[in-house]
């Protein structure tokens, strides 16, 4: 598959930073017809050495960093594990939060009966923390900035649902009105910062949301 829908934001000998489009897997799915994904497209179009460090959901767009050699992959993976990276997302959510900002600290776990959904579970869930900030109010929805401190699957989507502000276009978690309010999931990784694995320089990249 061509690279045409994947914008290369930055590249050097150690790392690639790309803007992943919505409706593209980060890595291959289990089924044969899910082989098309970000890493496959990169490896087949000039970057055979590219290695995934972290992922974005299929429907989520925005910034991803990939490593280009084993040592860089190891170091970037460590930074994500030790929460030394910074990630910020832009989202559109249903309704209007009463406060200008806040935090959501609710434990999450995978829910096999409703797969691939995740749920809040205070007994068996893993700790999860999200900070949010209101950016704009519109007639029926709001634009918010979301900063995940932990990196649980579907964390931002489930946390915003838990405070009664599901994300627009979210086919897994939103109610009918919020789901119908936009043709795509309105969640975009707009800022990513990390320390370059070779030079030690702190790098920061920004990519405005397409919605």
Image: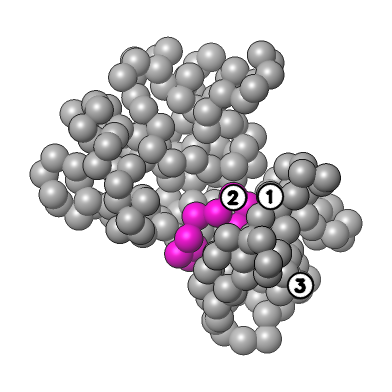
Of residues 199 and 46, which is closer to you in this image? 199
Task: Give the number of the disc on residue 2.
Answer: none
Q: CA distance from mark 1 to mark 2?
A: 8 Å
The residue located at (62%, 65%) in the rendering is: 107
The residue located at (24%, 42%) in the rendering is: 75
Q: Earlier in the sequence, mark 2 or mark 3?
A: 2
Task: Give the number of the disc on residue 153.
Answer: 2
User: Circle 1 is placed at which residue position?
Assistant: 110
Of residues 60 and 142, which is closer to you in this image? 60
Tell me where residue 67 appears, x and y as whole percent. Answer: 30, 32
Tell me where residue 171 appears, x and y as whole percent. Answer: 78, 47
Relative side of 87 to 158, left or right: left
The secondary structure type at the circle numbered 2 is loop
Tell me where residue 114 appears, x and y as whole percent. Answer: 82, 46
Q: CA distance from mark 3 to mark 1?
A: 20 Å
Please report the bounds of the magenta region as a residue range.
146-156
User: Circle 3 is placed at which residue position?
Assistant: 164
Image quadrant where residue 135 sits:
bottom right
Q: Residue furthest right?
A: 176
Q: Are marks 1 and 2 in contact (CB under 8 Å)?
A: yes
The secondary structure type at the circle numbered 3 is loop
198 is higher (above) or lower (below) than 156: above
37 is higher (above) or lower (below) than 146: above
Q: Residue furthest left?
A: 199
Callout in the foreground (2, 3): 2
Q: Residue furthest front?
A: 123
């Amino acid at each position: 598959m061509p690279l045409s829908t994947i914008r290369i934001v930055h590249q050097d000998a150690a790392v690639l930073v790309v803007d992943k489009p919505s409706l593209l897997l980060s890595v291959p799915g289990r089924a044969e017809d899910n082989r098309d994904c970000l890493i496959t497209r990169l490896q087949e179009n000039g970057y055979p050495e590219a290695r995934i460090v972290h992922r974005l959901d299929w429907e989520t767009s925005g910034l991803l960093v990939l490593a280009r050699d084993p040592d860089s992959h190891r170091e970037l993976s460590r930074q994500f594990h030790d929460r030394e990276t910074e990630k910020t997302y832009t989202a559109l959510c249903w309704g209007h939060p009463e406060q200008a900002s806040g935090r959501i600290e609710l434990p999450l776990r995978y829910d096999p009966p409703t797969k691939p959904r995740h749920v809040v579970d205070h007994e068996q869930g893993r700790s999860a923390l999200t900070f949010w900030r209101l950016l704009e109010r519109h007639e029926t929805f709001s634009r918010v900035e979301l900063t995940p401190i932990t990196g649980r699957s579907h964390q931002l989507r489930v946390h915003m649902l838990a405070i009664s502000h599901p994300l627009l276009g979210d086919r897994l978690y939103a109610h009918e009105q919020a789901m119908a309010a936009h043709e795509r999931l309105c969640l975009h990784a707009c800022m990513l910062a990390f320390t370059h694995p070779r030079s030690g320089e702190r790098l920061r990249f920004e990519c405005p949301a397409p919605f």
